[in-house]
Image (cartoon, grey):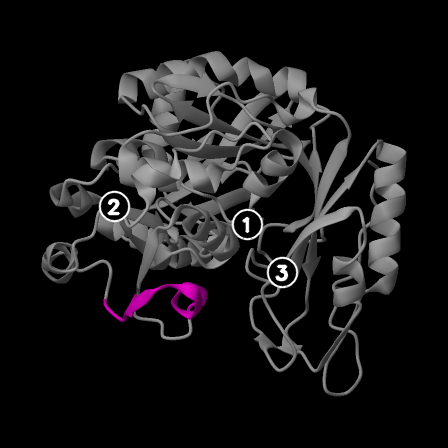
Amino acid sequence: MCERETKNKELRGKRLAVFGANNVTEEVTAFARRHGIVLVSVGNVPDAPMHQVSDEQYYLDCTDEAVMLPFFKEKHIDGLLSCSGEMVIRKSVGWIGKADFPYYAKPHQWNMLMNKQHFKEACRKYAMPVIPEYRIEDTDISFPVIVKPVDNGGSFGITVCHNREELEHAVALARKYSTVGEYLCEKFLEGPYFQFEIWRQDGRSYFPYTKSRVFYDAVGNSPAQPFIDLYPSKEAGIIEKLYEPMTRLFNDLGVDNGSCMFQGIISDGRPYIMDCAFRLSGGMDFRVVREATGIDLVSCYMQYALTGRFCGGGISCVYASQGAYATLCIGLKNGLISRIYGIEEIRAMPYVYSLYQYYHEGDTMEYSGLFLGILCRIFVKAESKDELKRNIGAILSLLCVEDENGKSLLLGYPKYDL
């Protein structure tokens, strides 16, 4: 393992407030127990996973400055780890600095990176390819287009439109899901998907992985959702063209520590960034990096929150590591999940190094076709792509999810080529 951790004695007894952290509960808990950190979970959802494992639980609105700033002082909080969704961070990033904690994001940085329109302007400034965009009043719109809230993610409020009638409905929906009531309308590009992250430590940039993706068929007018994430991307050489301008952007923004995910489409040999996430992203790619390199991004954030030092420098890239990696996203149709077969057998497979389950028997799926519409993420490794394909086939052959009438709730698996 090449993970760099501050010694126990410096962290022991520190009190770390945690917002959200649903999909990193395992990582947060393990690091805290290893170093004697007191976990203080904050949030107004009583059954949130972090509340189930923390040392102290407080059911408060973590976006309310008037509540939280006195709370931090009263409870002698030493640092804050905010792993919430985009909207919670957006509502709190403006006042967190007043608590005088080390925090990876400042308001102007968040506004530049997480407002899609502002980020497009930054891409132009730093000579990165920019997807053509339109306004609803334009008369020369080249359909199809994709319409998004300018400041929200997770597939909510996003629509692919093929004509002006669909566009009018899509703009109204996107504005509804935007905190500022604005939308972004872009040409709908088709081509190889790519994803990468930039990790920053003390003003230096690291690029720990590249990723490609196999998609399910789109449900309705929602964008297609992931079926298999593949590491490394076949298009790594094209993606690397973005590393230098992206580093200049982060240098100029003054982002010294933290991470940001970027995803996009390669069209006519040019990499267009569609979206980014200046936070620990929901795809949990950090688990792949940890397995491949030993660097734990969640631990980096926790150490930074309590010491002001973001560990993990000298990160080696996944595509420089041995082997191949994949994450299976098991999509579901809407309905009551009555029976799930195969999960425990899959979890015990030697090449499955992690499995995160979102839904269980008795839950109801309501988000089919959206980013939240998956049963679980299954993290798979192999020595080669051929072995990886065999491993994926073995996993999929075991899995069965049924509704109360015995009908399968699994989305049809698309054909794929690794």
Which badge, 1 or 2, is on the more N-terminal residue? 2
Location of residue 393 in the rendering, given as x and y in whole percent from the top left corner: 87, 51
Residue in view at x 35 percent, y 33 percent: 113
**Visible in this render: residue 278?**
no
Location of residue 119 in the rendering, given as x and y in whole percent from the top left corner: 36, 30
> Circle 1 — which element?
strand
| Circle number at residue 79 | 2
Residue type (three-letter) at the residue carrying disc 2: Gly
For label 1, the crowd category at 10 Å Cα-Cα, with few meaning under 14, some 14 to 19 and many 20 or more, is: many
Residue type (three-letter) at the residue carrying disc 1: Cys
Instruction: Check disc 1 and report the residue beneath it.
Output: 161
> Circle 2 — which element?
strand
Instruction: Check disc 3 and report the residue beneath it.
Output: 220
Give the image quarter of residue 363.
Answer: bottom right
Location of residue 72 in the rendering, given as x and y in whole percent from the top left corner: 16, 55
Give the image quarter of residue 174.
Answer: bottom left
Q: Quadrant of the N terminus?
A: top right
> Circle 3 — which element?
loop
Q: Quadrant of the C terminus?
A: top right
Q: In the picture shown, does residue 303 fall above or below 228?
A: above
**Visible in this render: residue 72?**
yes
Question: For this rendering, which residue is in front, 383 or 373?
Answer: 383
* Residue located farthest toward the front when viewing the structure as drawn: 9
Q: How far apart are marks 3 and 2 (CA)?
A: 43 Å
Location of residue 378 in the rendering, given as x and y in whole percent from the top left corner: 70, 53
Which region shows up in magenta?
48-60
Residue in view at x 57 percent, y 55 percent: 222
Question: For this rendering, which residue is in front, 96 or 33?
Answer: 33
